[in-house]
């Protein structure tokens, strides 16, 4: 493998039902940041689907310089085989130095399949990407390679952080957790160079047949979209005691979320978990109630605009990242806070 042949930062622009997923814009934004540190400054989005050419302009507005379009009726709905054939063919033809895929249900299936086909490594569920040297610290007698993609992800259930590189193969591939990277402000009217590429699709015994698509209705709010989050931890005490947080969230127009300990205890569903092994959130206001502030949780909410912590332990690490902190019994403080908010709103 001639590593010098591989240039540029590429992202898989996921779309479902001809609508781009938010992770596509987040990856383009992160790719622009990474590309600024490399010789090739361009960012290329790989758009795969059927009848999706109209989405290229939207990718351009969010920062894509080029869009490689693979458009074919076989790609109408996501299936592993045709999508893996499309993306691996693009990689073999255009030779990107870096290939980013969202760690969504689709990306977690597609990424490993493609990496195996193009014979490279893949780091899954990344929370941070940087361009740097590998090994991180020079080792006597061992070559230190520069301009490597350093991929950071939680390991061992979030109890440690690993930084991984792929110095000897290309592309350097990673799946990136949704909500971690920031999309750029869109530039209306921006255009990208669109390259239409079709490797040809011949159905084989790996092409599954979709008999029916059932779209489930999820009655759990997506905490990644919430502007105000009222998040509870083990200190809340019980599932029943989350009623205090429900009342506060209702009064302030927020959404309830939680820490991993709450999910592990069976008090709340996984969809509401904030942290390295949950979701990364950036609300305007984040209430951390009965949450100690372990690094795994803080990594998922530290970018919130305002963090308000309520904890009876004055030495709890959560106060190190909080903008406002209240030391005391949440069973007394939260109801008083809820009542004060209701009273204030009633007077307006």
Image (spheres, helix red, strand yellow):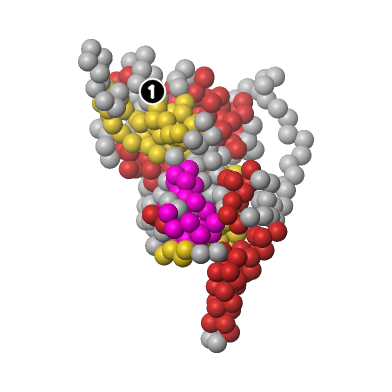
Relative to the observer, which residue lies in front, 243 or 212? Answer: 243
Locate residue 114, reporting x and y percent.
52, 25
Residue 98 versus residue 145 in the image, above or below? below
Q: Is residue 115 visible?
A: yes
Q: Residue most toward the bottom?
A: 347
Q: Is residue 283 visible?
A: no
Locate residue 242, reporting x and y percent.
65, 60
Image point (70%, 19%), residue name: 205
Q: Residue most toward the top?
A: 141
Segment colored magenta: 288-315
Image point (55%, 61%), residue name: 230
Quadrant hosting residue 41? top left
| Magenta span contains residue 292 | yes
Locate residue 198, reporting x and y percent.
51, 29
Locate residue 11, reporting x and y percent.
44, 37
Q: Residue most toward the right?
A: 211
Residue topped by disc 1: 166
Quadrant hosting residue 76? top right
How many numbered circles does the render carry?
Answer: 1
Q: Quadrant of the N terminus?
A: top left
Relative to the observer, which residue lies in front, 179 or 40? Answer: 179
| Magenta span contains residue 9 | no
Image point (34%, 24%), residue name: 6
Question: Is 79 left or right of 122, judged from the image as shown?
Answer: right
Tell me the crowding category of disc 1: few under 14, some 14 to 19, or many 20 or more residues within 10 angstroms, Cα based.
some
Image point (64%, 68%), residue name: 247
- What is the secondary structure assignment of the residue under circle 1? loop
């Amino acid at each position: 493998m001639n590593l010098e042949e591989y240039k540029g930062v590429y992202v898989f622009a996921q779309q479902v039902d001809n609508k781009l997923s938010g992770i596509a814009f987040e990856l383009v934004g992160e790719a622009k940041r990474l590309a600024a540190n490399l010789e090739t400054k361009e960012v290329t989005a790989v758009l795969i689907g059927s009848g999706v050419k109209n989405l290229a302009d939207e990718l351009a507005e969010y920062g894509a310089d080029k869009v490689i379009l693979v458009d074919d009726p076989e790609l109408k709905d996501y299936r592993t085989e045709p999508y893996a054939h499309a993306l691996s063919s693009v990689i073999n033809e255009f030779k990107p130095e870096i290939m980013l895929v969202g760690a969504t249900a689709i990306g977690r299936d597609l990424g490993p399949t493609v990496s195996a086909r193009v014979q490279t490594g893949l780091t899954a569920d990344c929370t941070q990407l940087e361009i740097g040297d590998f090994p991180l610290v020079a080792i006597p007698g061992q070559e230190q390679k520069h301009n490597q993609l350093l991929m950071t992800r939680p390991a061992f259930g979030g109890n440690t952080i690993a930084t991984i590189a792929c110095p000897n193969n290309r592309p350097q591939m990673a799946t990136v957790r949704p909500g971690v990277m920031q999309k750029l402000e869109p530039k209306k009217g921006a255009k990208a160079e669109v390259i239409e590429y079709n490797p040809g699709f011949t159905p084989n015994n790996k092409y599954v047949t979709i008999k029916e698509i059932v779209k489930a209705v999820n009655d759990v709010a997506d905490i990644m979209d919430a502007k105000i989050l009222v998040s509870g931890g083990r200190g809340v005490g019980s599932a029943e005691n989350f009623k205090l947080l429900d009342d506060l969230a209702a009064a302030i127009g927020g959404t309830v979320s939680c820490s991993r300990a709450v999910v592990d205890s069976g008090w709340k569903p996984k969809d509401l978990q904030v942290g390295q092994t949950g979701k990364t959130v950036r609300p305007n206001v984040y209430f951390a109630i009965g949450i100690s502030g372990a690094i795994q949780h803080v990594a998922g909410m530290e970018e919130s605009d305002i963090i308000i912590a309520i904890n009876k332990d004055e030495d709890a690490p959560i106060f190190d990242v909080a903008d406002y902190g209240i030391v005391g019994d949440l069973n007394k403080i939260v109801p008083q806070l809820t009542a004060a908010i209701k009273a204030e709103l009633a007077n307006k």
